[in-house]
Structures are given as structure tokens and as C-alpha cells.
């Protein structure tokens, strides 16, 4: 049974090479994030020869204001990948002051993605969910948005779904009551597994890509269906997403 992690930061583990080796051994499908355009080539190199790992080109919202000068590099690298992330907005206290500049950077990125024919996007939205959805609505041709760790209300989730969004959910998100309430409102055919490792943690330890499918059990309780059915749904969702992406992650092989 295939393991899948749609959002993790391979380059930020203390021993990235070991994590990649183990992920390859276990056959995990991974969407590997980068936080800045300058990190992209190095992170992509980590996954060289790993056929189930795809590296996304990102500019993390916590860095977007300070690294806006990397947008030309982002533009230059964009044709090398069908995946973009981590991008988005962060309106939490330490980053609220730069929110307008973050929004400017995000709009530029969404425009570039639309001009490139659409990408698969992994988006951060902490304390900025309505604004993020507004920006996605401005540029609907940017591609397929995956809202990562999206702790929205039922109303926000409905709006996001109408905008074509997917939702990536990890074990750490399901540890909080708020996260569980959000997941209960998500359409089951739009949910994907993630870890957000090494930031996503469980029992005080970082999650690894092969842990993402552990959400099947808590989701089974929330959705009131058997865990095996949840796992099958998550795999079928991943297959559909992969088929919609320009660059197929040998989607047919996801058993
Ligand atoms: Mn992340």
C-alpha cells in the first residue's frame, strides 16, 4: 500500500540524505517543499534518481517580504517543475506587518503560474485564510491549489472547495480539536496526507514522510468509516491529483 506525503521539507531535516534513502526504501510518494528559490536546486538534487519524489519551487510567506528580490529567480526556475510550494500568506503576530507585501509576492507568483499554464500549488494560510482565498479567486488559472494545514471554518472550507482547492492534512493537525473540526467539514474526495516534517511533530518528535498516512485512523473516527476505506480514499485522491498535474507521478502505480 503506497505511502504519500504531499507537504514536507526534506532539506530541513538534520540528516536529509538519510530521510530520502529511507523514503525511497519505503516507496513513499513525496512532494518536497522549498522555502526560497535559492534553495530549489539543492533540494532537487537531494531527490535525484528518486522517481517518487517531486521538488516544488517555493517562497515561504514568512520569508516572502525579505526575499522578494528572489522573484526573478523564481520566474527563471519555474519551467523546471510542475509544483510550487511552499507559498502563501502568514498573518500571525510576527509576520502581520508584512502581510501586504506577502500578498504582492503571492499575486506575482500566482500570475507566473497562470502564465505557465497552471501548476500544482501547496499553500500556507496561517491567520490569513479569507485573504488567501481572495487572492486565489483573483488568479483562478494559477493551477491546482492544495491548502496545507488549513484550519478553516465550514464556510471557508466550502468557499475553498468551490475555488477548486484540495486540502493536505497531517497527524499534527489532527492532534488539535480545531484541526479535527476543520477536517470534518472537508469533502472526503479532496483530502490528501501530509506531514509538514520536520516542523510537523508528534510526541515531541518530528514526523517523517512515511508517517503521513497515519491520518487514516483519526480520520476514520471523524468520518465514521473504516480506516481502510479512508486509506483507499486518500490514495484515490492522490491518483486524481497526479492525473491532473502536468507531470505524472506514475499515478497508475499507486495501489
Ligand atoms: Mn511547511
Image: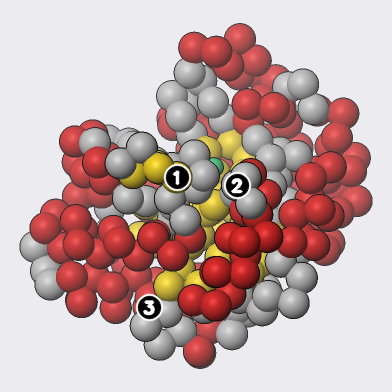
The residue pinned by badge 1 equals 206
Judge by depth and name the residue closer to the eye, 131 or 199.
199
Residue contact at pointers 1 and 2, CB within 8 angstroms? yes
- Helix, strand or loop status at disc 2: loop
The residue positioned 28% from the left and 73% from the top of the image is: 231
Q: Is the CB of the residue bearing disc 1 within 8 angstroms of ligand 1?
A: no
Q: Pick whichever of labels 3 and 2 is earlier in the sequence.
A: 2
Q: CA distance from mark 1 to mark 2?
A: 9 Å
The residue positioned 65% from the left and 35% from the top of the image is: 60
Residue 130 lies, in percent from the top left, at 44, 30
Give the quadrant of residue 4: bottom left
The residue positioned 80% from the left and 28% from the top of the image is: 68
Circle on res. 166: none
- Helix, strand or loop status at disc 1: strand
Give the quadrant of residue 69: top right
- Helix, strand or loop status at disc 3: helix
Instruction: Specify whether 177 is left or right of 211.
Output: left
Judge by depth and name the residue closer to the eye, 234 or 38.
38
Judge by depth and name the residue closer to the eye, 134 or 31.
31
The residue pinned by badge 3 equals 236
Residue 45 lies, in percent from the top left, at 80, 62
The residue pinned by badge 2 equals 13
* Count of numbered labels shown in the rendering: 3
Residue 107 lies, in percent from the top left, at 69, 36
Residue contact at pointers 3 and 2, CB within 8 angstroms? no
Instruction: Specify whether 160 is left or right of 48.
Output: left
Q: CA distance from mark 3 to mark 2?
A: 29 Å
Instruction: Specify whether 3 is left or right of 225.
Output: right
Q: CA distance from mark 1 to mark 3?
A: 27 Å
Q: Pick whichever of labels 1 and 2 is earlier in the sequence.
A: 2
Amino acid at each position: 500500500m503506497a505511502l504519500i506525503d504531499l507537504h514536507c521539507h526534506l532539506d530541513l531535516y538534520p540528516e536529509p540524505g538519510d530521510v530520502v534513502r529511507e523514503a525511497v526504501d519505503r516507496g513513499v510518494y513525496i512532494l518536497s517543499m522549498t522555502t526560497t528559490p535559492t534553495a530549489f536546486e539543492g533540494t532537487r538534487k537531494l531527490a535525484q534518481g528518486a522517481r517518487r519524489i517531486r521538488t516544488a519551487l517555493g517562497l515561504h510567506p514568512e520569508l516572502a517580504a525579505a526575499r522578494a528580490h528572489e522573484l526573478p529567480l523564481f520566474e527563471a526556475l519555474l519551467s523546471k517543475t510542475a509544483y510550487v510550494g511552499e507559498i502563501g500568506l502568514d498573518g500571525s503576530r510576527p509576520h502581520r506587518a508584512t502581510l501586504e507585501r506577502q500578498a504582492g509576492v503571492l499575486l506575482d507568483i500566482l500570475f507566473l503560474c497562470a502564465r505557465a499554464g497552471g501548476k500544482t500549488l501547496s499553500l500556507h494560510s496561517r491567520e490569513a485564510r479569507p485573504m488567501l482565498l481572495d487572492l486565489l479567486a483573483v488568479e483562478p488559472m494559477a493551477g491546482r491549489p492544495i491548502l496545507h494545514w488549513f484550519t478553516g471554518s465550514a464556510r471557508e472550507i466550502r468557499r475553498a472547495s468551490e475555488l477548486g482547492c484540495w486540502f493536505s492534512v497531517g497527524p499534527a493537525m489532527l492532534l488539535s480539536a480545531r484541526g479535527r473540526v476543520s477536517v470534518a467539514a472537508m469533502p472526503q474526495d479532496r483530502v490528501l496526507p501530509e506531514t509538514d516534517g520536520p516542523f510537523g511533530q508528534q510526541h515531541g518528535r518530528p514526523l517523517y514522510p512515511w508517517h503521513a498516512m497515519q491520518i487514516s485512523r483519526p480520520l476514520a473516527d471523524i468520518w465514521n468509516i473504516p480506516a481502510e476505506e479512508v486509506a483507499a480514499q486518500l490514495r484515490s485522491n492522490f491518483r486524481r491529483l497526479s492525473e491532473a498535474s502536468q507531470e505524472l507521478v506514475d499515478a497508475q502505480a499507486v495501489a
